[in-house]
Amino acid sequence: MKRTWKQAFRDLEADEALVSYLLLVTLPFPPVQAGESRRTPADKSVRATQPNTISGMSVPTWLKVLNSEVIGCTRCPRLVDYREQIAREKRRAYRDCEYWGKPVPGFGDPHARVLVLGLAPGAHGSNRTGRMFTGDSSGNFLYPVLHETGFALLPTATARDDGQALTGLYITAAARCAPPDNKPLPEELAQCAPFLERELEGLKDLRVVVALGRIGFEAYLNFLMRRKLIARKREYEFRHGAEYALADGRVLLASYHPSNQNTQTGKLTKEMFRKIFKRARELADESTGRILR
Ligand code: SF4
């Protein structure tokens, strides 16, 4: 049957609509505009574009419950006094800021393969902003490296609502309250350990633990001791770049802490730190079977 030009035009419109629909439902990302990159610098998964702050939609219930318990915790009287005193008195440079002044919950991707385990919030950093490694010099050293190695959406971390998001990585600390002189007491670390334990249980995809500093390193070994996965700690020497395959199937990577004391003296350089996170990514990717060698 011979088709009129009107009929042919309607068929063409219908075909175009079908193609557009198929493109829409099969593309993982919205169409890229001129000058935009389809991949975020942090890459590599759709989750990179989704929020994962404590108030983000992608936070699972167990983590929401845990975080609200962390934020309300008052188990260590010395630390409660200190964090609140700092929040009241403030540093001159931040006198117009409203300090967080509470325990700081973990931050990142609940499907993380890599855990960064630090020491404790900085008095005028996380204790001010309420997010791990945010708003201080340690964070200024850490986040650019996380961004370069594809774990962080942005190279900066300045506030809880700065748009930062982590992919494949979660940041936590051995103690959640800022301690005087950055030195939590052993009993304070012990009080805080159950929070870490619950994170380690809940983050089911973890394959690599990057311990930033000796206290974070010890905190993970203590966790393994409590689980009877290791009998003693003396085989595990803390050295920058040390790497230990553990009985829980994870790898523990040791790094110097990115504190001023280490970064300004050259004890920890950007290149040394970059290597740690490149290695962490390699180990995490190996465990997914994505790297073959
Ligand atoms: S350090 Fe941990 S256990 Fe102690 S008050 Fe802060 S959140 Fe609670």
Image (tube, grey):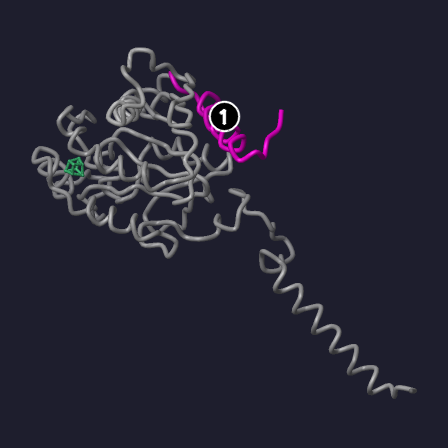
Q: Is residue 85 above or below residue 9?
A: above
Residue 74 picture location, percent across and down: 11, 41
Total numbered labels placed on residues in the image: 1
Q: Is 103 on the left-hand or right-hand side of 202?
A: left
Q: Which residue is drawn at 39% across and 40% down?
A: 204
Residue located at (49% from left, 32% from top): 284
Residue under pointer 1 = 279
- What's the residue at 42%, 30% (across, down)? 208
- Residue 57: quadrant of the picture: bottom left
Amino acid on which the number 1 mark rests in the picture: Arg
In the displayed structure, 37 sits above or below 277; it is below
The N terminus lies in which quarter of the figure?
bottom right
Q: Is 131 situated above or below 262?
A: below
Magenta stretch holds residue 88 = no
| Residue 51 position within the rendered picture, expressed as x and y whole percent measured from the top left | 41, 52
Q: In this view, does 112 lie to the left or right of 105?
A: right
User: 243 and 119: which one is in front?
Assistant: 243
Disc 1 secondary structure class: helix
Q: Tell me the chief SS of the magenta region.
A: helix
Q: Magenta residues?
A: 266-293
**Is 273 inside the magenta-drawn segment?**
yes
